[in-house]
Amino acid sequence: MTGRLQGKRALIYGGGTGLGFACGGAMAAEGAAVFLSGRRPERLATALERLGSGVRAGFEPGDATLEPDVQRVTEAAVRFLGGLDTLVISCGTSGITPILSASLAEFRTICDANLTSTFLACRYGAPHMTAGGSGSIIAISSIFGLVGAVERVGYCASKHGVIGLVRAAALDLADKGVRVNALCPGFVETELALEIASRAPNPEAALHQRRTMHPMPRAGLAEEVAEAAVYLASDRAAWTTGQAIAVDGGYTAR
């Protein structure tokens, strides 16, 4: 590793598993101190062990859809890290929500998990970055924040919303030294993605379809998305803000 993030201090929501953990591991490997948050303390403790003893890392459980939890987690991260200049928002959920049958409760649950969490994390993390005069916020959206998908009204609406929030926040913070960007992964075989696929009538067929829907006919790797996050967190991305960057094997190129 090249130490691209030496001295950076990263708070990662959804950091116990999946893309969030991959981002935390990649950032730590490049020299960053990391602080993980998520709803399940046992997963966070396991994630900390997986990062290894040579990494400066801490954690605080919390629900990223609840304002008091986000305030508490943010303050705990700032105390542990000694400040904050990198924020990754990788928490969220999905679900089958056809427009003809989805309930309001299902729609709200998905939008809270994906969009409200992004707003709250930015709202309480950004002031610590503006106080320091620099920072990078990285929200994990999706290819379905860029295009539509059958029976995914809640997911598509929330992930499109994440990109809209990113673009507006990037303009609010551009003259304060804080950059805001979104990553839009294709299908990556995270715990959440596999759990969603398992609900299909034929889970193996569903997995095969998801893997081969990309022009590059395979699932993406969490490490490939994490590498893009490392770039956005680094000073090499100092003139990149307000962008929604697809890491998708060519899916959105069609």
Image (cartoon, rainbow, N blue to C red):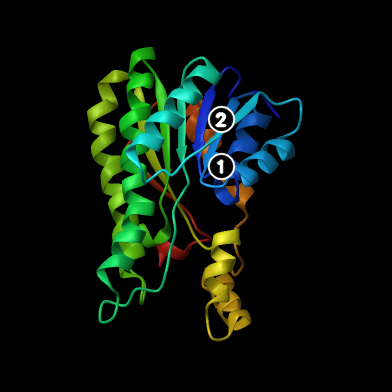
- The residue lying furthest to the bottom in this view is 201
In this picture, is 160 found above or below 254?
Answer: above
Residue 216 seen by the camera: no
Q: Position of residue 174 (x, y in %)?
A: 28, 26
**SS label for mark 1:** loop
**SS label for mark 2:** strand
Residue at 27% in and 41% down: 167
- The residue lying furthest to the right in this view is 53
Q: Amino acid at mark 1?
A: Gly
Tag 2 residue: 35
Measure how far apart labels 1 and 2 are at the Cα level: 8 Å
Find residue 211 and report its image quarter.
bottom right
Q: Quadrant of the N terminus?
A: top right
Q: Amino acid at mark 2?
A: Phe
In this picture, is 234 found above or below 204?
Answer: above
Mark 1 packing: few (<14 Cα in 10 Å), some, or many (20+)?
many
Q: Position of residue 101 (x, y in %)?
A: 28, 81
Find residue 95 and report its image quarter.
bottom left
Residue 200 seen by the camera: yes
Residue at 33% in and 50% down: 115
* 11 left or right of 122 in image: right
Q: Position of residue 109 (x, y in %)?
A: 34, 60
- Between 127 and 8, the residue placed more toward the observer is 127
Earlier along the polypeptide chain: callout 1 or callout 2? 1
Residue at 42% in and 56% down: 142
* 14 left or right of 27 in image: left
Number of marks present in the image shown: 2
Residue at 30% in and 69% down: 153
Mark 2 packing: few (<14 Cα in 10 Å), some, or many (20+)?
many
Find residue 52 and report its image quarter.
top right
Tag 1 residue: 15
- Between 77 and 245, the residue placed more toward the observer is 77
